[in-house]
Amino acid sequence: MQTVTPSHLVDLLPRPAGRNSVLAWNAVVIAVAVLFTAACAQVSIPLGFTPVPLTLQTFAVLLSGAVLGPRRGAASQAAYWAVGALGAPFYSAGEGGWDAATGATAGYLAGFVVAAFVAGWMSERGNDRNFVTSLSTMVFASAVIYACGAVWLSWSLGIPVANGERNAIALGVAPFLPGDALKIVAASAVAPGLWALAYSGTARNRPK
C-alpha cells in the first residue's frame, strides 16, 4: 500500500472519522491557533512614537499558516480578529472591542489572515520541509503583513505610505524589522523541525 504524505503538519495528528467529527476537529485546531495567537499578542512592548506595538503575534500567524494549511490557517486568523472585535481581550496588551479591531492597527489584523493563507499555501507545496524554503515562505508572508498594515496605517493616520518624515513605513514597518527577523528565523526553524521530529518518530516505531 502506498503511503500518502500529509500536506500539513496538523494532518499528522489522528483525525476522527465522519463528517461531523472532522468539522468539530477542524474547529478545535482552529480554536487552538486562535488562543496561541492571543497568547503571543500578550507579549507586547508599546513604542511611544507609533500606535503599533512590538509583539510575538507574527510568529503565531506564520506558524498557524504553516501548520494548519491555507484555509484553516486563514480561518484561525479571521476568527482571532472577529473574537477580538466582539470584546475578547485577545489583542496586544489585553485589548479588544470594535474600536481596537478597526483602529490604526486593523491593517495588520487583515494582513494576518492573508499571510496565514500564503504561508499555508506555500507550505502545502512542501516549502516548510527544510529551513531555506521555509525561510522564503515566512519572509514573503511577513511582507504581506507589512504591506496591509502600512497601507491601512497610512489611511488611518492620514500620512503618506513612504514619503516625508512621518510616514507609515517609518511608523509601522522599519522599527519592527530586527525583531521580526528573529521571529521569521524561529518560525522557519520550527516547521521543518517538527516534520523531522515526526518522521524520526515514525522511523523508530516502524516494525523491523
Image (spheres, helix red, strand yellow):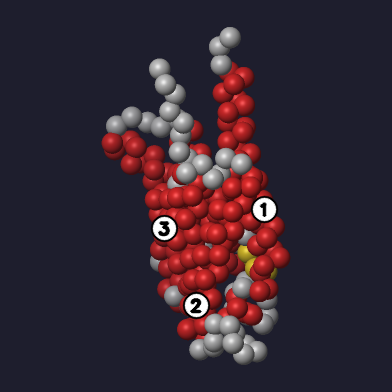
Label 2 vs label 3, nearer the camera: 2
Q: Which residue is mark 3?
A: 79
Amino acid type at circle 3 is: Ala
Vertical relation: 84 (above or below) 116: below
Label 3 vs label 1, nearer the camera: 1
| Helix, strand or loop status at disc 1 | helix
What x and y, as percent, mark residue 109?
48, 67
What is the tally of numbered marks visible in this picture?
Answer: 3
Q: Residue furthest top?
A: 208
| Helix, strand or loop status at disc 3 | helix
Structural distance between the alpha carbons of marks 2 and 3: 22 Å
Q: Residues within 10 Å of mark 2 (few under 14, many from 20)?
A: some
What x and y, as percent, mark residue 94?
56, 66
Q: Is residue 140 visible?
A: yes
- Name the residue rendered at 56%, 44% in the picture: 128
Amino acid type at circle 1 is: Val
| Helix, strand or loop status at disc 2 | helix
Q: Is residue 186 left or right of residue 69?
A: right
- Name the residue rendered at 51%, 65% in the picture: 144
Structural distance between the alpha carbons of marks 3 and 1: 26 Å
Q: Residues within 10 Å of mark 3 (few under 14, many from 20)?
A: some
Q: Which residue is mark 2?
A: 151
**Pick the front one: 105 or 4:** 4
Work out which quarter of the rendered image holds the C terminus and state it: top right
Amino acid type at circle 2 is: Val
Q: Is residue 200 left or right of residue 113?
A: right
What x and y, as percent, mark residue 66?
52, 48
**Pick the front one: 46 or 62:** 62
**Residue 59, quarter of the rendered image:** bottom right
Q: Which mark is residue 185?
A: 1
